Amino acid sequence: MNKFYNAFGQLKYFETFDNKDIEKELDIKNSKKKELKISLLEEIKLFRKKLENGTITKNEVMLKMDRYNELYRADKLTDPEINALKNLESTTRSKMNGIGLRGNLDLGGIIRAKGFYLQDGTKLNEVTKVEKKLAIPIDKKGNISFKPPVKQGKINMETNIDIATKKRSGINPKNQPSLYVTGDSHSGEYGQKSIAEFRHTNQNQGIGIGYNTIYATGNHPNQSIHLKSKGLGVINLNKKTEFGSNIRNPGELQIHNSKTLNNKNGYTTYFNYKKTGRNYIRGSTTIEDGEFQIVNPKNKDNKTGLRTQFNHKNSGNNYIRGKTEIVGSELKVITKKGIIHHGHGKVSSFGSLNSGWCHLITNAPQFYMNKNLQINGSISSYHNKPINCNRGINASGNNLLQGNTRIKGNLEVDSIKMGNYHIYPQGGNRDHGSDLVFHNRKNGKKLMVINANGQLNVYPYAGRRSGAISNLVGRL
């Protein structure tokens, strides 16, 4: 049995014939038929005789009628053959229990009959005339309504809507959807053939469905598509998500942000801004238990084109490739091994390796500073080891040396201040013809002078030179 809705929206049942039975009957018939092939017109006449004599089964009748209908629809019948089929009407009506129709019945006139009978032979006393009834059931409010019949307060069966624009191929769904629609379609684009479109009454905007695309449709030249959740619900994109169709038509992602403490100006977050490959992430950003990769091109700042990777393979390691600029009031780096720099086969690190010191370490042979170094504090050796100045010290201004100091090599100074005494050169220049003066810093008077010839002049506190000592030293 098959079910269907009639023109009045009522669920009806009709008897169908098993294809296996039909095929079986056909095999039996073909096996017994040994006569020569005859023309189609003669076959139709023979078919009519068998109907009149009652020597043909119901299944054979249906099989024949299906074949003749296919030939008629394919416009493969001649006029005599068509007329012969029309003459079958009276014989079929008298010999068969009604006319079984498969498909739609399109009438251009009025049905006239001497009587109307049910399937079991019961005669109807009258046929009720119903006006303004359509093939699609409409409720009292004018809405299209497909509802299964109700029997004793319960829904008797499930009702599905199945629409096919042409004969289907492939495998049907395991469970029949409530609404199942198939048809030839483009992948999905405005102006192309699609499976379905839903538009506003003015047809300016709408949504279309292709065989793998949901697209914007309508007369409006620029139309957006919105996906909205309800309440606290979210929109989930499971599986891999791509923006853009290919490298020639890349996509762009924009996230509109509100003004918050983390984004005071409410700037928009952009990925592939205006399809230029630039990304702008605004506000606080957190990535948990995942990896974030950026594919970089080859250029002077990234000659190998290596990718930028954050949390590489969920290992917690980050690799930033290319030129990187960090702008802000401060940069905080929290690490137990300091900042490690690799370059030219050497490694340098800066940071605190323990709680007592800040370390500047390298495996390069030496440090180089191209500017003056100012230290607010003292310079001391690690574990009180001597400071090795193998290239000399050029110290200007006032310098204080405390403790034992050993100088191996030349020591060149402009002056020396020790307690109340000041030693400095005077006259000429330091390299040629200058005198060495010993000065009392307390009273501001000279104590003695040694000239370039080695003569020593000693001054009493009165300020006069002692000639005797001078001559004596000179002779020595």
Image (tube, rainbow, N blue to C red):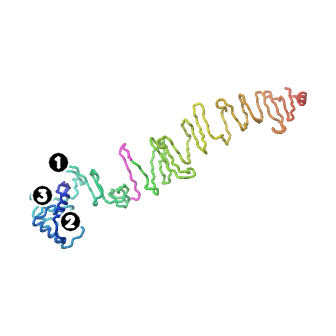
Amino acid type at mark 1: Lys
Q: What's the mark number on residue 151? A: 1
Q: What's the mark number on residue 67? A: 2
Left-right relation of 38 to 419: left
Q: Badge 3: how crowded within 10 Å, few (<14), some, or many (20+)?
A: few
Q: Are marks 2 and 1 in contact (CB under 8 Å)?
A: no
**Marks 2/3: CA–CA distance:** 25 Å
Above or below for 49 versus 362 = below
Above or below for 116 versus 156 = below
Q: Considering depth in this image, is 241 or 204 the residue closer to the camera?
A: 241
Q: What's the mark number on residue 119? A: 3
Amino acid type at mark 3: Gln
Q: What's the mark number on residue 401? A: none
**Marks 2/1: CA–CA distance:** 39 Å
Left-right relation of 231 to 310: left
Q: Helix or strand or loop: what does disc 2 sit on?
A: helix
x, y percentage for residue 436?
A: 82, 33
Q: Badge 1: how crowded within 10 Å, few (<14), some, or many (20+)?
A: few
Q: Considering depth in this image, is 304 or 433 the residue closer to the camera?
A: 304
